[in-house]
Image: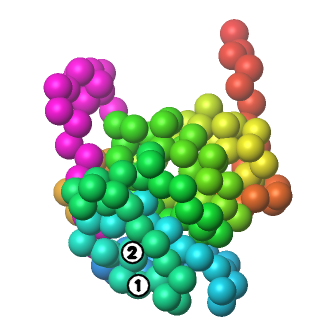
Amino acid sequence: MSSAISRNIKNRKNANDIFITPLELAKKHIDMIDYKDNDVWLDPCKNDGSYYNQFPNDNKDYCEILNDRDYFDYKGNPEIIVQNPPYSLMDKWINKNIELNPRIISMLIGIGNLTTKRIQALENAGYGLTKMKMLKVYKWYGMSCIVVFEKGQKSIIEYDRKVYK
């Protein structure tokens, strides 16, 4: 990413975080989840229901700020959270995911949002990155990825945060 584009994104006054996940992609994302028949699913940013309407059972819940159901006020106990979260709130969003303590946290995010710091926060909470798929979505900036973090599982990646000179 060029420094000018990066600077414009970081300094924008209004974060434009509403990016509707195409139905086919939401289904592909859901299909990456190893679920149990009675699992409770949560879509924390439902919008048009791309995810919510395709969850594989009726044990589901949702949040949607446009319907006065703020994710940060949610108190349920989902086993699985599947989402396309608002990128401008990513750290706060990940912390809320961790607070709810589901078995699986899965996100569709921009590849640049998958930082070592965020992976480490999830790992410190007991989640391993078990699946990752890179993809391109029409009109979305850059590459995106689906990531699946599972409680008590080993990560498929290793990282080194040392700065080499």
> Image quadrant of residue 163?
top right
**Can you identify the residue that label 2 sits on?**
51
Q: Dot 2: within a 10 Å radius of its alpha carbon, few (fewer than 14), some, or many (20 or more) residues? A: many
Mark 1 in CB contact with mark 2 (< 8 angstroms):
yes
Residue at (36, 51) in percent of width and height? 70
Task: Residue 49 in the image: state x and y as whole percent.
Answer: 31, 75
Q: Is residue 17 magenta?
A: yes
Residue at (62, 53) in percent of width and height? 100
Q: Amino acid at mark 1?
A: Gln
Q: Does 99 sit left or right of 68 as displayed?
A: right
Q: Does 16 sit left or right of 118 as displayed?
A: left
Task: Residue 44 in the image: state x and y as whole percent.
Answer: 42, 60
Is 136 drawn above or below residue 24 in the view shown? above
Is 104 drawn above or below residue 125 in the view shown? below
Q: Along the line of sight, which residue is nearer the eye, 54 or 29? A: 54
Q: Secondary structure at mark 1?
A: helix
Q: Is residue 110 magenta?
A: no
Q: Amino acid at mark 2?
A: Tyr
Is 14 drawn above or below residue 139 in the view shown? above
Magenta-tinted stretch: 1-22
Task: Residue 67 in the image: state x and y as whole percent.
Answer: 24, 61
**Can you identify the residue that label 1 sits on?**
54
Q: How many marks?
A: 2
Residue at (60, 67) in percent of width and height? 78
Q: Does 140 sit left or right of 24 as displayed?
A: left
